[in-house]
Amino acid sequence: MKIMMNQCRAEILRLLRNPYYVFWSLFMPILFYIIFTKVINLDVPDKKLWEAHYLMSMATFSVMGSAIMTMGIRIVQERAEGWTTFIRVTPLSRAVYFFAKMTGQTMIHLFSIVVIFLVGGLMNGISLPPYEWIMSGCWILLGSLPFLGLGTLVGTMKRVDTASGVSNVVYMLLAITGGMWMPMDILPKTVQTIGAWLPAYNFGNGAWEIIRGQSPEIKNILILAGYLLLFMVLSTYIRRKQEAV
């Protein structure tokens, strides 16, 4: 247990010092939020609802990027530097290694959510019932699990530059097709149809439903659970194939 706690603490400190995390998970979402709620004057019927809606979009965008890019790229980098080989001769088991990564990443996600929620509350005076703040935060934390699975799948790649390029492209495509940058209603019908079955939209939609006084749809939960299972099975299979070589 002491080894696990120390490893979790080390992972959290390393993540906070990671420039990828600072840029993609804090700077970019906050910048987008300022632009689309303060700089660009959008003609929306309910401005306060839009500001709350976009706050949830940027919180999910932040967490999704941290899960896919920060975690995936670091796994590849550590394997390339021989770290994962080194831990085999230490008391740190592989299970504890990955558990610490997942736990550390989840704590970082919680930190990102709190910071972005504070920005929305202080900048635009967003006032939601405590229940909606708590439930949307919990949904974003739990809904990030499939993207952590995707991060471990990215982590099976052999080169850091390849993992960085692929994760960037996947992250941007998911953000666009998931309606995180702009409402799904204004996207082309083809994008809407495809996006409805991708994890990003179902992730964001759960938070959007909560701030409207609803609950996440069963479809959102089932699709996210399916993607989590898919990504974990694929990453486990690929990793075992790599070790067998």
Image (cartoon, grey):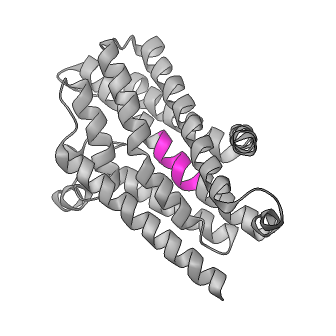
Q: Is residue 64 magenta?
A: yes
What residue is drawn where x is 21% and y is 26%? 44
Give the main secondary structure, helix, strand or loop, of the magenta stretch: helix
Image quarter of residue 203:
top left
Task: Decide which of 238, 244 is in the foreground and name it.
Answer: 244
> Does 73 appear in magenta?
no
Residue 244 versus residue 152 in the image, above or below: below
Residue 42 image position (x, y, % from top left): 28, 28
- Location of residue 214 in the rendering, given as x and y in whole percent from the top left corner: 17, 28
Quadrant of image for the C terminus: bottom right
Image position of 150 with respect to 236: above or below: above
Picture residue at 68% right of the left edge, 55% below the top: 97
Q: Is residue 161 above or below residue 70?
A: below
Please state if 220 lies on the left or on the right of 75 as rendered: left
Of residues 199 and 189, the one drawn nearer to the viewer in this rendering: 199
**Which quadrant holds the N terminus?**
top right
**Could you say which is closer to the camera, residue 95 or residue 239?**
95
The answer to whether residue 203 is seen in the rendering is: yes
- Residue 29 image offset from top left, x and y in percent: 49, 36
**Residue 75 percent coordinates (x, y):** 66, 61
Whether residue 55 is visible, yes or no, is: no
Identify the residue shown where x is 27% and y is 26%: 50
Range of residues picked out in magenta: 62-69
Q: How many marks?
A: 0
